[in-house]
Amino acid sequence: MAEKYVLVTGAAKGIGRASALHLDKLGFTVFAGVRRQADGESLCRDASPRLRPILLDVTDGDQIAAAVQQITAVVGAAGLHGLVNNAGVAVAAPLEFVPLDDVRWQLEVNVVGQLAVTQAFIPLLRLARGRVVNISSIGGKVATPLIGSYVASKFALEALTDALRMELKPWDIDVVAVQPGEIATPMWDSAGTIANQIMERMPAKAQELYGAALERLRQRAIKSGKNGASPQIVAEAVAHALTAPRARVRYLVGADARFVGRVIVNLPARLRDRMILSQA
């Protein structure tokens, strides 16, 4: 595996960190995309000497281009065996009041950024007949209230995954989606902070109408951050997607994701709405 190279974006924490470290333990040479040098140093302390941190903000075209140059200089004609598109953010706010600039940022990171990185690395993936693993979410199959812009980004990522898989098939580049349920990751702590900041900028009417619902969402996010499944189970799904002779098209990760993805998604829409709202 040491001669197989993988890039993981958003590797500083949560699913990205777990995936980078797990792939490193399996023997891959891992390029771990981080936005701060300190995060790269932290990864190196827990990894083998093969792991290479690389500064990579998926919304920064110059950093993407620099990453391509750095990685190409290492992998050469061997190419890139895997690209794990994990970088992502979550905006939590009612769609009635969410600032459109926040929606644009959500889509820029979770959709446009993923595509920008993929476009940049397709030539290296083509050399190795590599695979693209997009870290989506069960929220890419079923929408839930108050995180509408987030789930919209994941629905869009699902569409990009399917389209890319068909477009890249002539070169044997497989493209798959990993759809976790509730995972113990710092992202939802950040989402709660973002939600609070958004609400502070909203008119008083927004707080009057949605304040109680957003507080319930915040409490659920805190609970998920403490009691959600380990990011390791997502890392193991990522590893399977990169190493199996024939990867699955989608990986539902976690009991809650499997229930939603196999049962809830198939319910009549109005019944599904009632079930989701009963938990909101």
Image (cartoon, rainbow, N blue to C red):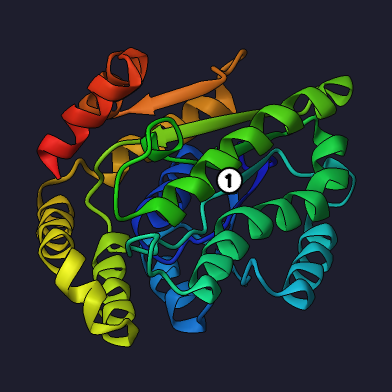
**Percent coordinates x, y for residue 243 in the rendering:** 57, 25
> Camera-side residue: 271 or 156?
271
Q: Amino acid at mark 1?
A: Val
Relative to residue 72, is residue 113 drawn left or right? left
The residue lying at 23 percent from left, 20 percent from top is 271
**Percent coordinates x, y for residue 63 in the rendering:** 73, 75
Res. 24 in view? no
Residue 9 against residue 176 in the figure, above or below? below
> Camera-side residue: 29 or 135?
135
**Which quadrant of the view contains residue 133?**
top right
The residue lying at 52 percent from left, 61 percent from top is 49
**Furthest-bottom residue in this view:** 201
Relative to residue 222, is residue 133 drawn left or right? right
Residue 240 against residue 72 in the figure, above or below? above
Q: Which residue is mark 1?
A: 84
Residue 162 against residue 12 in the figure, above or below? above
Q: Quadrant of the C terminus?
A: top left
**Percent coordinates x, y for residue 110 in the rendering:** 55, 56
Res. 68 in view? yes
Relative to residue 15, is residue 73 drawn left or right? right
